[in-house]
Amino acid sequence: MALKKKPAPKKTEVYFSEKKSVEVVQKRSGPKANKRVKFLVDSLVKHMHAFIKETEPTLDEWMAGIQFLTKTGHLSNDWRQEFILLSDTLGISMLVETINNRKTTGETESTVLGPFHVSNAPRYPNGANICLDGKGEPLLVSGTVHNVKAKPIAGATLDVWQTNEDGFYDVQQKGIQPDNNLRGVFTADEKGRFNFKSAYPRFYPIPYDGTVGDMLKALDRNPNRPAHIHFIVSAPGYKPVTTHLFTPDCPWLKEDAVFGVKESLIADFKNKGDHWEVEWDFVLSKA
Ligand code: BEZ
Ligand code: FE
């Protein structure tokens, strides 16, 4: 009787090959791996290996990429975050932000926070002027904070910041602009209403003297953000919204370097001759 041939043991892939690269790396994690970290890293490996297989970089190109990221890290410190800028200019910040703030009930849409928000900006009463350097065309901003059923939210907080006429935030020009120029925190009154004076915003370039600037130049992309005013609007029991108001006439509206423009955030700034006015309602949903 012929001896039955033993089936060959199933080959497990432990050695690296181009074909099985993803599987080999993913299988390396052990039984105690953190599930969420493993999910994230496995997905990153899958997509990064696909990127390498599609683009087939030379060794020099790969090293240039490593050097780009190294320099990006070296440029980052307490007041400059080149990695966030990289994420912003690749549209990744907006994607993460949009996925985490899917709107369903008519609340105000959100957009990027950006690197120039300052916690503990001065608190002002309604009607105050946040333009401390007197530059730019005067602007009156007013409106209401209400819930998705149009009920005013008394006591809502509005944290506001913007650049000056020269296109810089106060924190970018310490000693040149007054501290806290064009930023402040306001409280909506018992009818949810707020108002303050400021200056008509203008477009400005994101910092482009670093690796992100090099990338934008190589891609023939502009570094400009269309004119906007930043807001974080919050109230107890409601989901805070980080958002902007964009002017409708800015030439860079359709080419925002960080993809932050959403159509619903383009406001009607009215020219009143010696000043501008914009009226805007912020809508918050329950937390
Ligand atoms: C800003 O609007 O302040 C901003 C957002 C992203 C990158 C740089 C600046
Ligand atoms: Fe900004």
Image: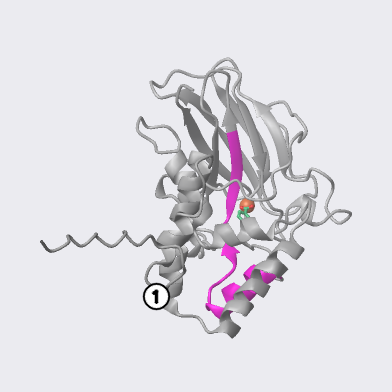
Q: Is residue 232 left or right of residue 130?
A: left
Task: Give the amino acid type for the residue marked by disc 1 in the picture.
Answer: Glu
Name the residue: 44% across, 18% down.
151
Q: Note whether 179 is above or below 147 in the view shown.
A: below
The answer to whether residue 82 is magenta is no
Helix, strand or loop status at disc 1: helix
Name the residue: 44% across, 78% down.
55
What quarter of the picture does the N terminus occupy? bottom left
Q: Is mark 1 within 8 Å of ligand 1?
A: no
Of all residues, the one furthest to the left in this rendering is 1
Where residue 274 appears, x then y in whole percent? Answer: 63, 49
Q: Is residue 259 left or right of residue 190?
A: left
Query: How many marks are shown on the rendered structure?
Result: 1
> Would you identify the image quadrant in which residue 3 lies?
bottom left
Q: Which residue is mark 1?
A: 54
> Would you identify the image quadrant in which residue 173 lies?
bottom right
Q: Is residue 137 visible?
A: yes
Of all residues, the one furthest to the front in this rendering is 1
Where residue 190 appears, x then y in whole percent? Answer: 58, 15
Question: Colour scheme in the image?
Answer: one colour
Where residue 212 appears, x then y in whole percent? Answer: 63, 68
Q: Which residues are magenta?
A: 210-232
Q: Is residue 43 left or right of residue 176?
A: left
Where residue 59 appears, x then y in whole percent? Answer: 57, 83
Q: Residues within 10 Å of mark 1 (few under 14, many from 20)?
A: few
Name the residue: 60% across, 39% down.
231
Q: Note whether 11 is above or below 215 in the view shown.
A: above
Q: Is residue 248 visible?
A: no
Q: Nearer the viewer, residue 42 or 189?
A: 42
Q: Is residue 114 left or right of residue 101?
A: right
Q: Nearer the viewer, residue 279 or 77?
A: 77
Ligand 1 appears in which quadrant?
bottom right
